[in-house]
Amino acid sequence: MIRTLILLLALAPAGAAHSQDVVLKPLGEVRLRYESVDQDALADDAEALTLRVRAGIEARTGNWSVLVEGQGNLAIVDDYFDGLHGTATRPLIADPDNIALARAQVRYASPAFAVTAGRQRLAFDDERFVGSVGFRQNGQSFDAVRVEVTPLKGVKADIAYAWSVRTIWGIDSVGARQQAVSGDNLFGNVGVATPAGKLSAFAYLVDQDEAVMQGFRMSSQSYGARLDGSKPLGKTKISWQLSYARQSDWHRNPNSYGADYYLADVAVDFGGPRVGAGYEVLGADDGVALTSFQTPLATGFKYQGWADKFLTTPPDGVRDLYASAGWGWKAIGPLEVVILQAAYHDYRSDRASRSYGDEIDLLASAKLGKVTASARYAHYEADSFATDTDKYWLQLDWTL
């Protein structure tokens, strides 16, 4: 922490921290979630009722801020395998009991320049490569320094160096499920506003520099570009995403490989009804394990369905052809931001185009005051990969 504070002070403009009033902002979140999993080939189902609490404080003065936040997760009902305790005869629900310092950061921010040092959450673009894993109760944070520069209107450079990844596994971590994974991780993104949307070039260098992490085989370098845009047409809004990346081995990874990533996604919002479709490919090289396109620091729950069958990309890669439909309301009676949504995924291998299986995901959510309630369901029907799985969630979120 001392070295990050020294770097932060060196980067910040001189004289920026002159005496000003200090504004304190309390931080607080509570999440109660029930999750149930029925998975073929396992003797027992899994049931988890977990309670996550986050609390902290942020102090601001001028362009400076200091933030400290702690969190804890408690399993009230623990009839599940959390990856660390219990028996693997039950399905995995990756929310172990935990207590942790989630964030401890110092930040300087002006309109053209910002630097954040310390333990923090990182989310680059759509979190496909680097994210906070917000759905899991313990989440993911980084011991890092992040610099954001906006030299011109519509142009932004966002660069981070992280020497430790604080994982979702927490204080009882064991084996490959580490509490923290060290390494020299470098993340960079330069974006430019264009008439077609935000055009970004990115580089994500992931260094899982511990032998227990698949013998260093999750270390990789990914370089690519992304276009993210939208356009209103009367009451209708069309949004699109296009992305390409090339990944290869990096640092101490003993594998030698190259794999491609593609994403094409389009969505139409009719001012209530919403439809969308997309095609995402995490490519393969020669079919050897961990030589396909990997994203170990991503917020994986956002991609390739909620059944979590592809958090580690199979040796032959994965192609995900998907479509979604739903309806959103700003308010229904006392309820706000009411959402109904359904999605369908068809999964195939990148090599040989074998059918892996398909999945249906359903969501209903609504907000009442500071509380958001949601219900989810995921059904994965296996063909040649994994096993049939049903997952159910009921969740309440309260934010201060």
Image (cartoon, rainbow, N blue to C red):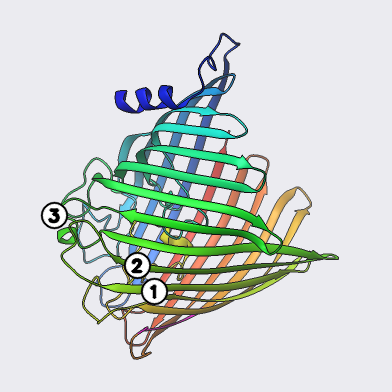
Q: Which residues are magenta?
A: 345-350
The residue that mark 1 highlights is 260
Name the spot of residue 255 as percent of width and height, x first.
Answer: 18, 69
The residue that mark 3 highlights is 211
- Furthest-right residue in this view: 234
Name the spot of residue 23 as percent of width and height, x first.
Answer: 59, 17
How many numbered marks have been drawn onto this rendered protein structure? Answer: 3
Identify which amino acid the numbered label 3 is placed on: Ala
Tell me, yes or no, if residue 20 can be seen here: yes
Report how far apart the C-alphas of labels 2 and 1 lie in the structure: 6 Å
Tell me, yes or no, if residue 307 can be seen here: no
* Secondary structure of the residue carrying numbered label 2: strand
The residue that mark 2 highlights is 247
Left/right of residue 374 with respect to residue 184 in the rendered view = right
**Which one is earlier in the sequence, the residue at label 2 or at label 3?**
3
279 is higher (above) or lower (below) than 270: below
Report how far apart the C-alphas of labels 3 and 1 lie in the structure: 25 Å
